[in-house]
Amino acid sequence: MRNIWTIYRKELNSYFVSPIAYILLLMFALIFGFFFWNAVGMFVYYGMESQMRGQMFPMNVNEQVIRPLLSNISVVGLFFIPMITMRVFAEEKRNGTIELLATSPVRDSEVIVGKWLAAVTLYATMLLFSAANFSFLFRYGNPDWKPLAIGYLGLLLQAGALLAIGTFVSTLTRNQIIAGAVTFGICLLLWVLEWVSGYETAAWARVLSYMSVITHYESFGKGVLAIKDALFYVTLIFLGLFLTARSMESLRWRS
């Protein structure tokens, strides 16, 4: 655990001693802030319009504001996750320090978990910035906090899975642009696999739909903690880190 903690702190510090973390946090906050402002504005507009017309439609903050916004965060994450992971091992290769890691007494699993946890922490910090917007809803409204908490848990699990995949991709190249592009392509593919179920009901289509990360977020978005969906994300995290370990092992043998 001590080695994991050391790697974790070193990796997390590397994000914040450079402009990377601050740029990502700023851009994420601005993008989500714009989404939040529009969602609340539309909610208030339709509420006032229904009152003026004498049509009292049921207005639900959780369903009409929070749930769509959480889905927006999931989409925005597709663009930010590759930016976080593209440097994890690719930069080590470019700087020539990957050989030091491969030949050090620190186990590969400790290096991988430490770096992955640092990436998850950075993404969790981004989610925390978005959560600050929802505090206004609790200040001026009365939303249910439980679906919001479960939705954020789903976002964190989904991001953890995609960050694990991005960590693996980063071990395959020394070029950060290539690592980011490939990670984005894989993340996007895992997102759109669910589309097949819209027009096909064969077994292969159901399998592809099941492999989509968005399919397993639907229950979290509704405020339902489904164990099977959580296990899917945990399995994907394990698979991504396992492939990363095998890639690091090959680097160790070559070193």
Image: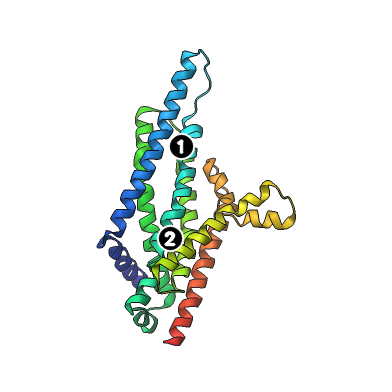
Position above or below: 115 against 143:
below
Give how far apart the Cα atoms at labels 2 and 1 are: 25 Å
Residue farthest right in this picture: 202
Q: Position of residue 62 (x, y in %)?
A: 48, 34
Q: Residue at x 40, y 59 (%)?
A: 120
- Identified by mark 2, the residue type is Pro
Which of label 2 and label 1 is nearer to you? Answer: 2
Q: Residues within 10 Å of mark 2 (few under 14, many from 20)?
A: many
Position above or below: 117 against 72:
below
Provide the secondary structure element on which disc 2 rests. Answer: helix
Name the mark on residue 66: 1
The reply to whether residue 149 is visible in this rendering is yes
The reply to whether residue 153 is visible in this rendering is no
Q: Residue at x 61, y 57 (%)?
A: 211
Q: Quadrant of the C terminus?
A: bottom left
Q: Are marks 2 and 1 in contact (CB under 8 Å)?
A: no
Q: Quadrant of the N terminus?
A: bottom left
Residue farthest left in this picture: 17
Provide the secondary structure element on which disc 1 rests. Answer: helix
Q: Is residue 104 left or right of residue 144?
A: left
Q: Residue at x 37, y 82 (%)?
A: 99
Residue 141, by quadrant, is: top left
Position above or below: 179 against 192:
below
Q: Position of residue 154 (x, y in %)?
A: 49, 49
Choose between 42 and 66: the one closer to the eye: 42
Q: Position of residue 240 (x, y in %)?
A: 51, 67
Q: Residue at x 50, y 25 (%)?
A: 59
Position above or below: 42 against 209:
above
Q: Position of residue 74 (x, y in %)?
A: 47, 48
Report which residue position mark 2 lands on: 82
- Identified by mark 1, the residue type is Ile
